[in-house]
Amino acid sequence: MRVSTKSDYALRALIEMAGRADGRAVSAEELGRLQEIPHGFLQAILADLRRAGIVISQRGQSGGWRMARTPDGVSVADVIRAVDGPLVSVYGLRPEAVSYNDSAEVLQHVWIAARSSLREVFERVSIQQLADGELPDAVKARTADEDAWTSH
């Protein structure tokens, strides 16, 4: 799986929103400046997150963007799906929709397993946990293995 720039920026913007103790709205300009996200790109990301019901925009003097749901109720998976679509796709199709001939049919099982593995991490980590810098133990355990930090 490749994490897109769009997903990375979306998560960083939401961490910034969730980290505000006062819960006040924050402007896109400030989010972009704090997280070094290009303004035009951020606006498109915020629009995707709004369509998914993750953020809301607020007009007026104290306007800006804030989370529509509690940060502990939004997972990394929710955000990725909102801005990039399914966690795993095979040439644009969900893994269960892909069909192969008999000799390659086993590949579908690999794609399904990969999606399941991603869900185990992405659905367990909330925006609030990211903002607090505290990951669930099961996710922390995956990073404890030195091999996890090396590319193959």
Image (cartoon, rainbow, N blue to C red):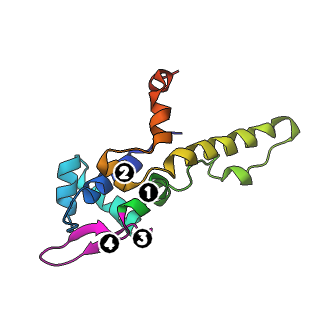
**Which label's residue is closer to the chain start, 3 or 1?**
3
**Which label's residue is closer to the chain start, 1 or 4?**
4
| Residue 54, horizontal then vertical, whole percent | 39, 66
| Residue 68, horizontal then vertical, whole percent | 35, 71
Quadrant in which residue 73 is drawn: bottom left
Give the Cα separation between the discs numbered 4 and 2: 20 Å
Q: Magenta part of the protein: which range?
A: 51-70
Q: Residue 41: tell me if it is visible.
A: no
- Secondary structure of the residue carrying tag 3 is loop
Dot 3 corresponds to which residue?
A: 53
Q: Residue at x 88, y 39 (%)?
A: 102
Residue 83 is left or right of residue 88, and the answer is left
Dot 4 corresponds to which residue?
A: 56
Give the Cα separation between the discs numbered 3 and 1: 10 Å
Labels 4 & 2 near each other (Cβ < 8 A): no
Kind of residue sitting beneath label 2: Gln
| Residue 63 part of the magenta segment | yes
Dot 2 corresponds to which residue?
A: 129
